[in-house]
Image: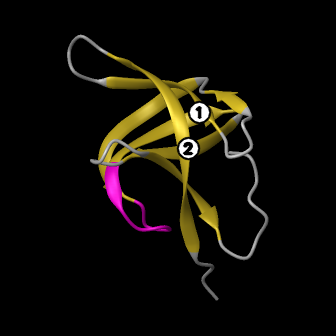
């Protein structure tokens, strides 16, 4: 059975680059914990197949794991989380 997912909106500190790109540096989780984004390995327009919505999808290395961070057109950042499970740190 497929688990449903939902969006968790997070605060993100990012650099807005001279050539027009955006480079996220760290995110702040719901509980106020700050997580540094070690590396961004890919940036592309994509849909969140788990939680719905679309925008720029940043594939990020955070705490040794690969995670998707989405930037919606309305200037909000979100990550995906599974319903029915305790939300874990990215």
Q: Earlier in the sequence, mark 2 or mark 1?
A: 2
Q: Is residue 43 above or below residue 26?
A: below
On screen, residue 20 versus residue 40, left or right, reads left
Disc 1 packing (10 Å; few <14; some 14–19; many ≥20): many
Please say if the residues under marks 2 and 1 sit with CB atoms less than 8 Å apart: yes
* Residue in view at x 63 percent, y 35 percent: 28
The quarter of the picture where residue 82 lies is: bottom right
Which residue in the rendered view is the most extreme toward the bottom?
Answer: 1
x, y percentage for residue 79? 54, 51
* Residue in view at x 31 percent, y 50 percent: 55
Secondary structure at numbered mark 2 = strand
Which span of residues is magenta-colored? 48-55
The verdict on residue 66 being magenta is no
Query: What's the mark number on residue 86?
Result: none
x, y percentage for residue 19? 20, 15
x, y percentage for residue 47? 35, 60
On screen, residue 67 versus residue 45, left or right, reads right
For disc 1, the marked residue is 27
Query: What's the mark number on residue 10?
Result: 2
Q: Is residue 63 visible?
A: no
On screen, residue 14 versus residue 90, left or right, reads left
**Screen quadrant of the N terminus:** bottom right
66 or 72, nearer to the observer: 72
């Amino acid at each position: 059975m497929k688990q449903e997912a939902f969006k968790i909106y997070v605060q993100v500190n990012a650099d807005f680059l001279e050539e027009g790109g955006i480079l996220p540096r760290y995110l702040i989780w719901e509980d106020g914990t700050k997580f540094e984004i070690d590396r961004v390995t890919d940036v592309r327009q994509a849909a969140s197949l788990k939680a719905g919505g679309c925008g720029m999808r940043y594939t990020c290395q955070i705490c040794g794991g690969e995670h998707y961070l989405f930037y919606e057109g309305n200037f909000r950042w979100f990550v995906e989380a599974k319903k029915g499970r305790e939300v874990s740190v990215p």
